[in-house]
Amino acid sequence: MALQNSASTERDVLAEELIRAHLTGAGLDAPSLPVPPNPAIAMEIQASVRERLARPVAGWKVAIGPEQLPVAAPLLAVYPDASSIPLSSKFTVEVELAVILRSDLPRRVGGFYERSDILDAIDKVVLGIEVIGGRFANPAGVPFLSFLADNLGNRAYVVGDTVSPAALDEINGLDCEVTLAGQSIFKAPATHPAKDPLLPLLAYANAQSDNLGGLKAGQVVTTGSLCGVLPIAVAGLLEARVARLGQISVRFE
């Protein structure tokens, strides 16, 4: 169902259902719900949900969507290394580098950020684990704009130890292993899909369209997976190790 003349009403319907799912854990049925007609409406829904949940924006998940569209979603649950998170059957994880901003990156009028500007705005580079587990019952059947409205499926983000800023240039090819409950679920060289982990952040910094204040100092910003998307099939301790950088963990209970 596409949003048409009743855009405001149907936008509110999707927002209300997403809020209910956040609060109750109930999975939503995508085919029965309206689909945002464009990214701007999807981002408005993100903001509406955040406002009703009254949770601070601790950071941003940035990504390049269909047709090379830069998009972002607020991180509303950020945890320190070795935290415990209740397990859902549909969780997946991504091991990443993330950055913590030293200064704001407001959208520029009449100009664009360069990669050097993004580097200047970074306080720290850290290892991170994104926990993906959106509010829809069947993630495979969710239209992209509904997925965007649902904070790009983000459930939580785990922030690990600080690593050298040089990791942004050297990450590709470093050995990466992820274990869950003592069993290896990934072992291969780290590979960022854009090759340069800063490219999604740079792209979104130059195309910001959120309704939540934008990229702010102190916020965590994701950069994209180094290991693809890994399903979490059992409870237990998940540990990720990246050669020369360190390790990070989260326990699923």
Image (cartoon, helix red, strand yellow):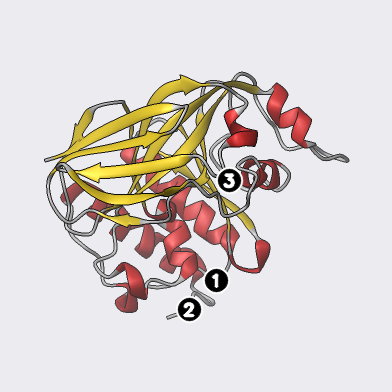
Q: Position of residue 50 (x, y in %)?
A: 40, 42
- Assess disc 1: are there few (<14), some (14-19) or many (≥20) residues with their C-alpha within 10 Å of its C-alpha: some
Left or right: residue 92 compared with residue 193: left
Under mark 2, the amino acid is Ala
In this rendered view, identify the residue nearer to me: 10 or 227: 227
- Mark 1 and mark 2 residues within 8 Å of each other at the beta carbon: yes
Q: Quadrant of the N terminus?
A: bottom left
| Residue behind mark 1 | 37
Q: Residue furthest right?
A: 110
Q: Position of residue 129 (x, y in %)?
A: 37, 39
Query: Could you say whether the residue bearing mark 2 is in a helix, strand or loop?
Result: loop
First along the sequence among labels 2 and 3: 2
Under mark 1, the amino acid is Pro
| Residue behind mark 3 | 210
Query: Could you say whether the residue bearing mark 1 is in a helix, strand or loop?
Result: loop
Q: Is residue 5 above or below residue 235?
A: below
Left or right: residue 28 compared with residue 225: left
Cα gap from disc 1 to disc 2, whole angstroms: 6 Å
- Assess disc 3: are there few (<14), some (14-19) or many (≥20) residues with their C-alpha within 10 Å of its C-alpha: some
Left or right: residue 112 compared with residue 90: right
First along the sequence among labels 1 and 2: 2
Residue 214 seen by the camera: no
**Residue at the image point whose x is 49% and y is 74% from the top:** 3
**Residue at the image point whose x is 48% and y is 68% from the top:** 144
